[in-house]
Amino acid sequence: MTSSYVTYSEIKRQPDTWKQTLQSVMEQKDMIKQLFNEVNPEEVIFVGCGTSYYISIAAALSFQEVTGISAKAVPASEVFLKPDSVINKNKRNIVIGTSRSGTTSEVVRAIEYVQNNNLGQCLGITGYPDSDLAQVAQKVINLPHIQEKSVVMTSSFTNLLLSLQLTTAIVADNQQLLDELHSLPDAGSNIMEKSEDLAREIGGNLAYDHFVYLGLGANFGLANEGMLKLKEMTQVHSEVYNPLEFRHGPISIIKENCLTVILTNQSILDFEQAVIKDVQKYNGAVLAVGELPDGFVADYQLNVGTGFSDVSREILYLPLLQLLAYYRTLKLQLNPDQPRNLSQVVKLK
Ligand code: F1P
């Protein structure tokens, strides 16, 4: 299917752009290793705004899991507005600022604050080599091929997250993870059609007018992104929870009009299957995504294939989430390229 919307073409082109990101970041392997060897960080703080904050959540949890170095994600604004609550000045820190545009004021101010107050060494990752972030940060990974015409971030999400996962694998000298990440472009191409078919079916089904996204660990960042895509593009009610936390109250909202999307982890599938059955008990429908075995129970399922760890599988979930929002936009006769109340970049006065 073709479409005149740039948002659609930017979603569909993702596997090809991942090849360019793999090449760009691997070319910077020595700079990355030198930065981490010189600082020998006790903590790595990932900062961003909006979609780039959700990238930071997924990246931070994956980074700590793979490297064993403490890591966390923080909205960029908290770095310069509440620094003592988010940065330990007595630790050796590396701060990684992620921004598609490189001109989001909060991210630039956060990096400037860290560098001006000697709170750590900073690495910027952006799509615009001539942006404020690229000029300010001590070290930079430039990914010009992720520049997008769309207001909402789509392929930039997966490419920025992939670049942070590659950084993680380089820091950890983890060849297995590097190999898995290098197989993502083919895997992404292989699941694009079935992702789109499922997205068209669910996005086009107006019986679902309330969406819940569930993700545990790094997948909580992905679940936030799925929520945000739907909210930004359609303003349909959408919310996010850790799957087991969902039972501690919020599950009270479940009824037949509610579609729950669960982004599973292979390593804890039994726990996530139990949550799905609880949602179904209250007449809620469930879309499960992941490496799902025969006999797995969910109303809708997308199997993204085998051979991946929970970390390397993450970006394969995104085309479905992005296309689900896209097809709901079309069903509501809205324009995905012109989301309400939004601009590509938020600038502070
Ligand atoms: C961050 C961001 C986007 C959001 C909107 C406004 O942009 O919050 O996530 O979708 O486009 O800007 P950036 O810092 O990654 O360029």
Image: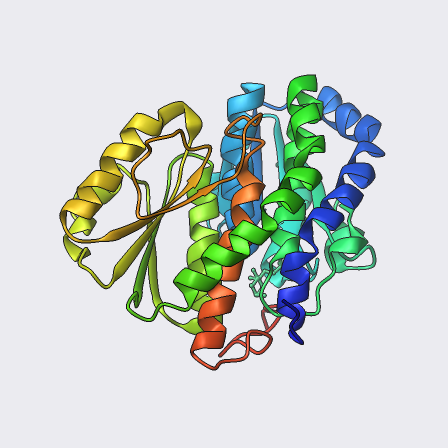
Q: Is residue 10 above or below residue 55?
A: below
Q: Is residue 148 left or right of residue 257?
A: right
Residue 210 appears anywhere in the view = yes
Out of 215 and 164, give the one closest to the viewer. 215
Question: Where does residue 135 sit, x and y in percent of width and height?
Answer: 80, 53
The answer to which of 267 and 151 lies nearer the viewer is 267
Which quadrant is home to the C terminus? bottom right
Q: Is residue 61 left or right of residue 117?
A: left
Q: Residue at x 71, y 64 (%)?
A: 148
The residue drawn where x is 73% and y is 54% is 133
Q: Looking at the rendering, which quadrant does residue 114 occupy?
A: top right
Residue 109: image location, x then y, percent: 63, 55
Answer above or below: position of 312 versus 86.
above
72 on left or right of 14: left
The residue under the point 49% across, 35% down is 72
Residue 145 placement: quadrant: bottom right
Q: Position of residue 180 (x, y in %)?
A: 65, 27
Residue 61: x and y in percent read 49, 32
User: 38 above or below 282?
Assistant: above
Residue at left offset 52%, top offset 39%: 304
Ligand 1 found in image quarter: bottom right
On the rendered structure, is 263 left or right of 56?
left
